[in-house]
Image (cartoon, grey):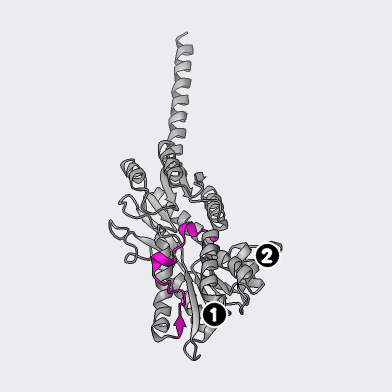
Amino acid sequence: MKRKVLSVLLCVAMAATMLVGCGSKKADAGSSGGGLVGVAMPTKDLQRWNQDGSNMEKELKAAGYDVDLQYASNDVATQVSQIENMISNGCKMLVIASIDGESLGTVLAQAKDAKIPVIAYDRLIMKSDAVTYYATFDNYMVGTKQGEYIVKALDLDNAAGPFNLEIFTGDPGDNNARFFYGGAMDVLQKYIDEGKLIVKSGQVDFETVATANWDSAKAQERMENIISSYYADGTQLDVVLCSNDSTAFGVENALEANYTGAWPVITGQDCDIANVKNMIAGKQSMSIFKDTRTLATQVVAMVDAVMKGGEPPINDTKSYDNGTGIIPSYLCEPVFADVNNYKELLIDSGYYTEDQLK
């Protein structure tokens, strides 16, 4: 009988040892990867955010993480609620593309109290000391590339001009819009000052040319008003600086319905399918290509480093002050696509299929 009891006790002890061993292995695995990552995207209404979200989810899962991916339909209250739920559901890290960069202070204070690191994704979150890192493309460079494209397309350094220019940028609550606008205007302002570029509408300052929510319909309405006021008499419009593809699409719709002159040079950003089709058709001159696969890969590397207790890769510690201090950032370099290179950049790379652009 004693032997039987001892045998049972030994089995229990061995089982307990095995359970402890399994538990320690699970903890080890958790410390080297895994855990729940919350990814908050602004909307599904713009193609690029669908791609950003799906790329992020795919790469994070491949790296061994669980993902809570949410889209907020461009509604700030919805995004705040989604982030609150991510925190209460045990997310170990947050990746947030904000709708309004100044509206997340309270919910991110909760994240900070819970010691949850926060990566601001593509759009800098303002006035919150809970933001740990920032990952984006070089937004100022986006603007300078658009400006430089215009300089070259119009041969502004040699042509006599003057050329008529109109300007459309993005949402005033999106800090990126100011970088896009600033980069482009730093290139173009001297030509405006020289009188080689003329803005007939007089609409130049950021607040006037901003487009709420980057909305195509709002851009279209404003362009229609500009055409009827300044270009209905046959005056030539030579170039429209558009900070992204949704504003460019609205401008192009307005031109198609209301403008009778030669088609202007039009810039854009994001290489949305509809805009690439317009580019192929000669209705848009270029679009900045920000390969979201590259940015997703970089963010996953940052998440992985932080979750393992290390330091993430950073290449900028000077440019992005969110009002509480400089946010350590990783900037990916954008390139531009036009009718001459879109196949190489977009189709050969697998970003789109040829059928998607027909």
Q: Which residue is mark 2?
A: 357
Amino acid at pointer 1: Asp
Q: Count neighbours of disc 2 (C-alpha within 10 A) and say few if under 14, some if 14 to 19, many if 20 or more.
A: some
Query: Where is residue 174, by image quadrant?
Result: bottom left
Amino acid at pointer 2: Leu
The C terminus is located in which quarter? bottom right
Disc 1 on helix, strand or loop? loop
Query: Where is residue 331, by image quadrant?
Result: bottom left
- Give the residue at x 67% y 72%: 281
> Residue 60 location, x and y as percent?
51, 50
Mark number for residue 238?
A: 1
Q: CA distance from mark 1 to mark 2?
A: 26 Å
> Residue 28 location, x and y as percent?
43, 41
Left or right side of 338 for 4: left
Range of magenta residues: 196-216
Mark number for residue 214?
A: none
Residue 279 is at least partly visible in this image: yes
Q: Which label lies toward us, 1 or 2?
A: 1
